[in-house]
Image: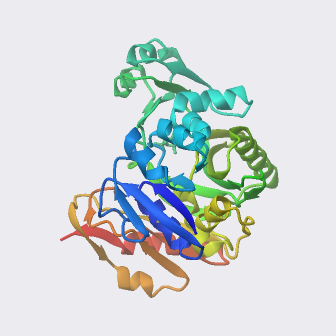
């Protein structure tokens, strides 16, 4: 049986393990927290620091394949493991490009992939010297996650909210829609592409609010989105699963925002709404099986279940009964013991032939299901 490891033990790892249960694979997870969402679903849990060279190297050296559920892993160890014959999804070289937003932006420009105009900034002083470029978005090169490394700078006075670290200063795009496109690539270079997803954001938390799939866009924009995301994965030259996040403007321009080299929050609906889920698909890639069918069974929506404001402590789920009574609604609780404001605690997927029904139920679920503390 193939021994395969996942670096990181969060909800993405947990859902990957749920899909792994259908395949002949022995699963290993490394993560610091023994109570993490993935810890109890794998065959072997190894406590360790995914950012530490020795921990990652020791974890991976007896495995045939490794994947990640978060980018902040020690890529030097992955490079060594790759050189020693362990298959890594994505390739460490692709991960290195993506992990650093400066390198990632440069990768898009080098390959003529449309992305918002930008400057590389070494520190906050460099941002100050580009005040004429505002309104812009300042993004930290490494270490940002879930909006924490991103600041919108509209006026020169706001520059002080920026980061005194290497990053990029990017033109503020007048966004009409944020779209994510999930694509799988196997070791033979064959590609499976999911229908794009329309992501709707909570501007206060800078976190995904809900999303609808397939995105409702004119055919010419859909073609642009597909061509651009195909180009991104082809140029990354790595097997694995990728989520290409894009901005669509009112003028119909499409810009790549960023790419995740792993399963992604914008693909959770594929568990119920598509024939092969993103998690199932990644195992097909890792284990060398034929790619799955990405077609939509029914349109889907996802509502993220975030810890309620002002609640910190042991998690309780209010309104769960009511939501579980709704038709074609699927609840996923990630098993995190502790909640805090804005923490991703689970998600709910809705499937329906009618887009209106999806939106209606998404709002109802948001107003009904709450993660609180006792
Ligand atoms: P993270 O990696 O933390 O998710 P992103 O780069 O995706 O950060 O940025 C978070 C959000 O900030 C985006 O989803 C988008 O809403 C907004 N944003 C990012 N870049 C721009 C931009 N150039 N113009 C307008 N809004 C942006």
Where, by quadrant of the figure, is residue 172 drawn? top right
Classify 347 as above or below 150.
below
Taking depth in this image into account, of 191 and 42 the one nearest to the observer is 42
- Give the percent coordinates (x, y) of residue 53: 41, 39
Can residue 355 be seen here?
Answer: no
Residue at the spot 45% in from the left edge and 88% down from the top edge: 325
Q: Position of residue 360 (x, y in %)?
A: 53, 73
Judging depth in this view, the residue of 309 and 181 nearest the camera is 181
Colour scheme in use: rainbow
Q: Is residue 26 left or right of residue 116?
A: left
Frontmost residue, 374 versus 96:
96
Location of the N terminus (image quadrant)? bottom right
Residue 86 vertical position relative to residue 100 in the rendered view, above or below: below
Residue 266 to residue 230: above or below? below
Q: How many marks?
A: 0
Residue drawn at point x = 70 percent, y = 76 percent:
297
Whether residue 157 is situated above or below residue 192 in the rendered picture: above
């Amino acid at each position: 049986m193939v021994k395969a490891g996942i670096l990181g033990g969060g909800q993405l790892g947990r859902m990957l393990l749920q899909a792994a249960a259908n395949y002949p694979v022995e699963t290993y997870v490394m993560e610091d927290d023994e109570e993490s969402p993935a810890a109890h679903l794998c065959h072997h849990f190894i406590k360790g620091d995914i950012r530490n060279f020795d921990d990652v190297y020791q974890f991976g050296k007896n495995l045939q394949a490794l994947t990640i559920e978060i980018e902040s892993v020690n890529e030097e160890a992955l490079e060594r493991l790759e050189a020693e014959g362990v298959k890594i999804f994505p390739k460490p070289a692709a991960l290195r490009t993506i992990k650093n937003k400066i390198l990632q932006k440069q990768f898009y420009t080098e390959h003529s992939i449309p992305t918002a105009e930008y400057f590389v900034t070494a520190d906050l002083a460099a941002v100050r010297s580009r005040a004429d470029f505002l309104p812009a978005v300042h993004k930290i090169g490494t270490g940002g996650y879930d909006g924490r490394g991103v600041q919108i700078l509209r006026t020169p006075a706001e520059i002080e909210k920026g980061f005194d670290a290497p990053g990029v200063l990017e033109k503020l795009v007048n966004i009409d829609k944020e779209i994510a496109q999930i694509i799988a690539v196997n070791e033979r270079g064959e590609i499976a592409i999911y229908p794009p997803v329309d992501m709707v954001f909570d501007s206060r938390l800078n976190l995904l609010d809900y999303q609808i799939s397939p995105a409702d866009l004119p055919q010419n924009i859909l073609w642009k989105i597909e061509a651009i995301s195909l180009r991104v994965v082809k140029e990354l030259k790595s097997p694995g699963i990728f989520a290409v996040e894009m901005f669509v403007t009112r003028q119909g321009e499409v810009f790549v925002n960023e790419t995740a080299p792993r399963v992604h929050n914008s693909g959770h609906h594929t568990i119920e709404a598509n024939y092969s889920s993103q998690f199932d698909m990644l195992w097909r890639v890792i284990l060398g099986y034929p790619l799955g069918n990405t077609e939509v069974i029914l349109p889907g929506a996802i509502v993220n279940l975030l810890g309620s404001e002002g609640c910190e402590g042991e998690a309780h789920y209010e309104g769960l009964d009511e939501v579980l009574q709704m038709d074609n609604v699927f609840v996923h609780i990630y098993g995190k013991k502790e909640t805090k404001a804005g923490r991703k605690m689970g998600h709910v997927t809705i499937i329906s032939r009618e887009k209106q029904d999806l939106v209606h139920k998404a709002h109802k679920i948001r107003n009904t299901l709450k993660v609180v503390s006792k």
